[in-house]
Amino acid sequence: MRTIAALVYLGWHFVKWFAIVSIVIWTIIFALGASLAEASENPPVKMSKSEICHAVDSSYYNRTKNFVAYETLDDCLEAGGRLPKNYKKKDALLNEEA
């Protein structure tokens, strides 16, 4: 009888341990997934299908849905993109070559 009680006791502790570890692992996975999704949604510079480079301060930045992401405005321009009409480069978005 004590053997069965000991097995039930150990089984219950294993189930509790497994549930806690599973919850912690899934929480980490979801947190990483959410942060990576957020980071990929708003890259610094977007080149649209019409090869126009939209920086964060561009009036069409939020409307641009089909794009290729670039780290800097200069990277986008070097890849063959162009600036939107009436747009002036901001120094914060330029790639500093030192």
Image (tube, grey):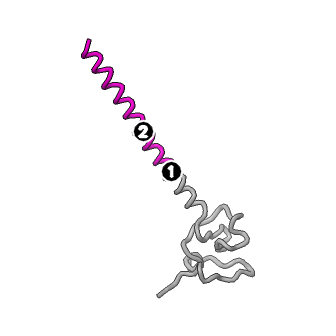
Q: Which residue is mark 1?
A: 31
Q: Can I make out residue 65 in this image? A: yes
Relative to 28, residue 4 above or below: above
User: Residue 89 location, x and y as percent?
Assistant: 65, 82
Which class describes the residues within 10 Å of circle 2: few (<14), some (14-19), or many (20+)?
few
**Residue 22 disc label:** 2
Contact? badges 2 and 1 (CB < 8 Å):
no
Could you tell me which quadrant the N terminus lies in? top left
Identified at 30% across, 17% down, the residue is: 5
For the residue pair 21 and 97, the one nearer the viewer reads as 21
Main secondary structure type of the part rendered in magenta: helix
- Asked where in the image residue 56 lies, by quadrant, the reply is bottom right
What's the magenta region?
A: 1-30
In this rendering, position of residue 75 left or right of residue 26: right
Mark closer to the chain start, 2 or 1: 2
Q: Residue furthest left?
A: 3
User: Residue 71 location, x and y as percent?
Assistant: 54, 72
In this rendering, position of residue 55 left or right of residue 86: left
Relative to 3, residue 12 above or below: below
Q: Can I make out residue 51 in this image? A: no
- Asked where in the image residue 19 lies, by quadrant, the reply is top left
| Amino acid type, residue under disc 1 in the picture | Ala
Identified at 69% across, 83% down, the residue is: 88
Q: Residue furthest bottom?
A: 98
Identified at 68% across, 68% down, the residue is: 61
User: Residue 82 location, x and y as percent?
Assistant: 65, 78
Relative to 46, residue 75 above or below: below
For the residue pair 1 and 51, the one nearer the viewer reads as 1
> In the rendered structure, does residue 25 fall within the stretch colored magenta?
yes
